[in-house]
Image (spheres, rainbow, N blue to C red):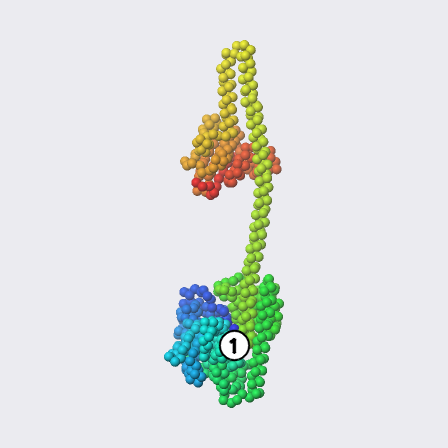
Amino acid sequence: MRVELFLNNLDEAYQISMYRAVRDEVEALGIELVCVQRATPDRYPMDRLVHKRDLKRFFMRERVGADGVLLLTSVVIRDDNEAASAVRMADRSFPLVSIGARMFDFPAIVVNGRAPMERLLEHLTQAHGYRKLLFLCGPERNQDSCEREAVFRSFINGEISGEVIHGEFNETSGMALMRDYIAAHPHEPLDAVIAASDTIALGVRRTLDAARDPRWKHCALTGYDDIPQSHLELPALTTIHQPFDAMGKIAVRLLRDSIMGKDTPLLTQVKAELCLRNSCGCKDMAWKQRERGRYWELTCNTRELSQETAYSVTHIAAQNTLWQERCLSYVSVFGQELTSVNTTQEIIPHLRFFLTNLDVEVFYLFINRRPSLKPPGSSALVLKRDKDGELAYKNPPNINLTAFFAGLDSSVCLYHLRSGNEYIGLIVYDIQDALHPHICSAAIFMANTIKRLLILEKEQRWAKQLEKEVALRTRDLNAEAKRRVAVEAEVLRISELERLRFSLDLHDDICQRLAGISMFARSLASGLSGISLLPELADMIDETLQRTRQYAHDSFPVELDTFGLRGALESLCNTINHACRCDFHWSAFAEKSPLSTQQNINVYRIIQEAVQNAVKHSGASRISVEIEMSALFFIARVRDNGKGKPALNSEDPILAGNKQSVGLGLRSMRYRAHQLNAEYVFNSTEQGTLVETRVPLRNIRR
């Protein structure tokens, strides 16, 4: 049989004491124990927890192979948190026993501390005459805290003044609460401070000892729980003893009976006891030895303290302090070393040295492949240390955690490595009781380090991806730069060719016609019979004028300024339709062109060149010009059914090595499409040619 103890952290004495009591009892009964820490999800789908199967998942019962759950309710459950909601909706048949507080319809072990609390207050007010009291309470919705606060408030009357301040059940909270109170009331020292737990009282003692006003140093102080450290305080702490041993024994036996299907009582009460020591102001306290584990309990005794007993207790306290300080130094060095690691593998040497210093024999470190909001079902085993020896994995295997816990044959503790709400790994270990706080501190260092390394690894992946993208972008930019250089050279070449063609047209056509006119005029001047030649001379002048106008029109179509792109294209198509001997079709948009003047000119020139090529070179019997406009593109398309040249499809005239393979017109169309930043399609086959230009409109205001 295996049971699970579900709590927060084994980093403070109350939870360690309860863990020790449960562990001793399960060992006596031959039951295995898995102590689960830091496993309460902050965000969990509560609507799914109605089913018993999901509640098992919530408490990790199935994962660790436990037959039942011991829930340290006093530290895990609050009225408004997720764990309370989960247990509230659970089936009564779920094997669960609550320790420290009532928990709905589940068996619970609670401490009856009302009477000892009343006796403590009576002792402070009647035996010592204290009248000004302060009660440092735990969380507002914690059951133990509420019960202790209720007793305190009921005791306050007109003669006795009391104030209540809420905090947490830890030493840091006690220090902070007391420091804030002294700062707010520097000249109003208290008679006594009643703490709701010994850990709060220990923090209060640190603050009182550091106070500048000596009146605060003599303030009486009491606690609650009777943890081992309260015995060794100077002065020894007056407190209310909780019977951890009895609670652990009863809880384990109740859970065992519940698992076996036996009837169990819903509520079991154990009595607390008042332990009067020196911190409340009693001066006649002596020391009575009674061994309890590694600690010594100091109780009320009317006899004087013998010198030998005083030396023994002082020696034990000194040894314990030195050991704790040494462990703290190991933790501190380990945390400092982790700040310099850059990979998870670099954690291993420092961790092995730390475990060796603490004499840890059983330890497993798992690191999740990726962070998750819930405990994962499998994780990578990075380090293993057990009875078979120690092994660090360079390529950590992914281990199914259910199978891993099924293979364990001893009691262990489980600590989830978390960063915020994310689970990033876990450690499984078995150590001496006094080392639990130090392992928890080291686990926090490891969790933060692993989280940092995961972020670093993610950033490195992003950096590599960015480098690849930069390299690709650089390659594209280099290709674009090469293309721009080639385009500029081609522009100069086309400009020179255009000038050459225009020069040849003027020389071979206009100049020759003007020379003929000049000869006719000389004939008239020589007195020849030129009257009959005047009509021919007039025709030559008219034809020359028409040719000159055509050259001017070809250089810049004035219709673009007058009638816009649609009108200019209609004029072009009408002219070609009358001149060619083929079936010519023309369709255009009804709206005004959204393109700029320069863009309109480029579109016009592409269509003009494509139509002229179809008329002159393809031998087509059908030519169509189509203009379309969508929300994204302005599309100009010229088709013909003539005989094309498929070899030209793959040629890029701007980058082609053989510039003679493509004519000036095709180069000009591609260049103009490039200037438009348009998608240009040239598809020539034996059955016809398609020239399509798609001008994007996303950056054009309409």
- Residue 59 at x, y percent in the picture: 46, 70
- Please report the residue visible at 55 percent of the width from the left and 69 percent of the height from the top: 443
* Residue nearest the viewer, comparing 286 with 652: 286
Tag 1 secondary structure:
helix
Q: Amino acid at mark 1?
A: Asp
Asked whether, in this view, residue 366 is left or right of residue 144, the answer is: right
Please tell me in which quadrant of the rendered image residue 322 appears: bottom right
- Residue 664 at x, y percent in the picture: 56, 32
Please tell me in which quadrant of the rendered image residue 361 appears: bottom right
In this rendering, the answer to whether 483 lies above or below 294 is above
In this rendering, the answer to whether 305 lies above or below 193 is below
- Please report the residue visible at 57 percent of the width from the left and 43 percent of the height from the top: 480
The answer to whether one can see residue 272 in this image is yes
- Please report the residue visible at 37 percent of the width from the left and 79 percent of the height from the top: 158
Q: Quadrant of the C terminus?
A: top left
Q: Residue beneath label 1, please?
A: 209
* Residue nearest the viewer, comparing 244 with 287: 287
